[in-house]
Amino acid sequence: MGSPPLPRRLAAEVLGTFGFFFMGFSAIAVAVDLPGVIGAGGVAAGFGLGLGLMIGAFGHVSGGHYNPAVTAGLSMAGRFRAGDVVPYWIAQLAGGLIAALLAWWLYPGDVRSALVNAPSPGTSNGVALVLEGIATFLFVMVILTVATDDRAPWKGLQAPVLIGGFIFIAAWTVGSFSGGSFNPARSLAPAIIDGSFSDIWIYLVGPLVGGALAGIVHPFVVGGRVADV
């Protein structure tokens, strides 16, 4: 069975990215406006479970990237058509902007600025950049195995759980220091809404470099048969 036409795949990327981000942004809103209801683990769960559920909903249509770094990594690994990279990036940013706008409109208090990524107090920009790159590198390595390597017994049905689970644990641990983006669209969308771009370079450069490196390294490590996503 062939891949769905590009417009349908782009629509799935918009919807999937929107759902993923809106669940995460809603978790941030709870943490900010209703202190004590959920903590860092709850915010991490909002993003991780939101991602897993949206992969389950639309991954069979678009591949469930929802992240420019993932799209870049898959393309570098030869698992995704280079000509579709920029359209996917545009769709992912569009979904993110819709999610950020709705979160800003629906939730009161300081949610608007809280959605903007920044390193934690005491974490330098350089350390945050490296942490974002490392986490995204590992994230895309996981995706390349669980979504494209036919030899992996956990490929396919377990992909939403494993991919969402990675974001959950990475956001709760590494993200506590770096700001926990691992996704340029996740950072850029609320930065545009808030007009706050002072740290945005960290969350563009780190994840994109980490994702691209994973796309280069993964084929040399695993070799063998894979599938396009």
Image (tube, rainbow, N blue to C red):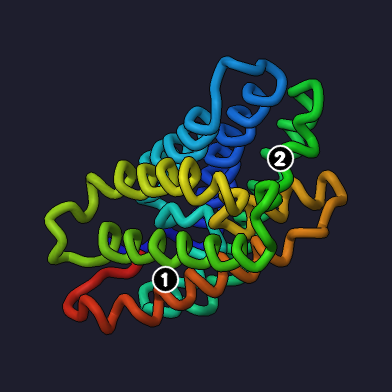
Whether 176 is drawn above or below 214: the answer is: above
Compare residues 78 and 216 and report the one nearer the observer: 216
Q: In which quarter of the image is the N terminus?
A: bottom left
Whole-percent x, y for residue 26 in the image: 62, 28
Using residue 2 as the reference point, say whether residue 167 is left or right of it: right
Whether 171 is drawn above or below 199: the answer is: above
Label 2 Cα neighbours within 10 Å, binned few <14 / some 14-19 / many ≥20: many
Quadrant of residue 168 within the rendered picture: top left
Whole-percent x, y for residue 120 in the image: 66, 47
Whole-percent x, y for residue 51 in the image: 46, 42
Residue projecting furthest to the right: 195
Mark identifier at residue 74: 1
Whether 206 is drawn above or below 153: the answer is: below
Q: Quadrant of the C terminus?
A: bottom left
Quadrant of residue 205 within the rendered picture: bottom right
Q: Which amino acid does label 1 sit on?
A: Leu
Residue projecting furthest to the front: 122
> Residue beneath label 2, please?
115
Using residue 227 as the reference point, say whether residue 101 is left or right of it: right
Task: Please tell me which residue is depicted at 79% across the width and 39% down the height of the picture.
Answer: 113
Check contact, mark 2 vs mark 1: CB within 8 A.
Answer: no
Task: Please tell me which residue is depicted at 36% across the width and 74% down the height of the picture.
Answer: 79
Q: In 3D space, how far apart are the residues under numbered discs 2 and 1 (Cα atoms)? A: 27 Å
Q: Is mark 2 on a helix, strand or loop?
A: loop
